[in-house]
Amino acid sequence: MPLPFKHLTSTKQLSREDTDSILEVCEKMEKVRSKGGSNLLEGKILANLFYEPSTRTNLSFATAMHRLEGKVITAVGMQFSSMYKGETIEDTMNVVGQYADIIAMRHPEKGSADIAASACPVPFINAGDGPNQHPTQGLLDILTIKKERGKLDGIHLTAVGDLKFGRTIHSVSFLLGLYDNVKFTLVSPKELPMPEKVTSFFKEKGIEYNETENLEDGLNADVIYMTRVQEERFENKDDFERLKLKYILKPEHVKDRDITVMHPLPRIGEIDTRVDELPNAAYFREVNNGVTLRMALLAMLLDKA
Ligand code: CP
């Protein structure tokens, strides 16, 4: 089941048909995982280039490749790469594309993924470009919503926290917005609102949304998607300290409600650890879905699904 593009840099490039195909391949990959894996990507090499910190994305791409018997080469940390010496992103892609069959890259600059894809001789996946996009997280989020709630049409999602710099909420908003009768409640401090690129998409598509500073206004939803306030994007650290724990989700907010709690992780205190014990807490299941989604995407972009 091939995708109609070679590179994945943004969830904005995906149609509903594309996301439905990816979710269908995810179902196949869950069966593959239940048997421990397969040799679908034997002989293929993934280059994992991480110029910004990561635990989940880096390791789940590697896990996905290993489960399909592919191999992984890795470069971690800008200071240990030749970009530190001034090599351009384009030259880096032309070089790494001689070694690997597919490249995943995380980079601190918005737009770096599009630059990389424009020069990349092999399929390229954006693993996060600054505050802009994180398409594989968005995809694993809609996989999680579908598994937890049994549907994507009609979902009411409340997004909480740093909606300005939180690239994952941008990515999942564009994806969920492809489905019918979805609705968003956007809870953020006034300093960290959802960017216009997302709200103008909601307006174009006629998607209902409302913005508020009160967490309690967002509890009557199907999904509450908590986000971390992104310290690394703040110029003024006092602003970060003031805002970082403005919203803390506690058991009393969700324990008697039919609401699924999601978070792309890492968290820095915005979900009380006591929530972890509740059946609503889906964020560690969400992590697990990341492996399935990346297995599906790697196989599709390598024309093996
Ligand atoms: N969710 C996510 O992108 O986590 P990492 O930063 O650990 O990859």
Image (spheres, grey):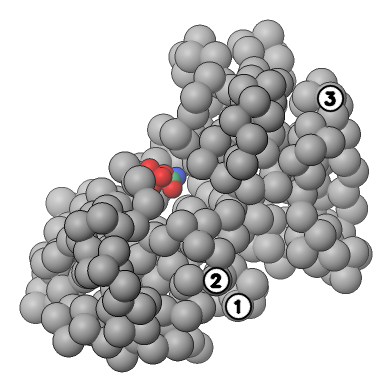
Q: CA distance from mark 3 to mark 1?
A: 32 Å
Q: Residue at x 31, y 42 (%)?
A: 55
Secondary element at tag 1: helix
Compared to residue 296, the image places residue 214 above or below, namely above
Compared to residue 129, the image places residue 187 above or below, namely above
- Residue located beneath label 1 in the image: 13
133 left or right of 286? right
Three-letter code, disc 3: Asn
Task: Give the crowd class for mark 3: few <14, some 14-19, many >=20 residues within 10 Å.
Answer: some
Three-letter code, disc 2: Gly
Q: Position of residue 96 (x, y in %)?
A: 21, 79
Judge by depth and name the residue closer to the eye, 20 or 79: 79
- Residue located beneath label 2 in the image: 111
Q: Position of residue 287 (x, y in %)?
A: 39, 41
Q: Residue at x 26, y 69 (%)?
A: 85
Judge by depth and name the residue closer to the eye, 222 or 6: 6
Disc on res. 214? 3
The C terminus is located in which quarter?
bottom left
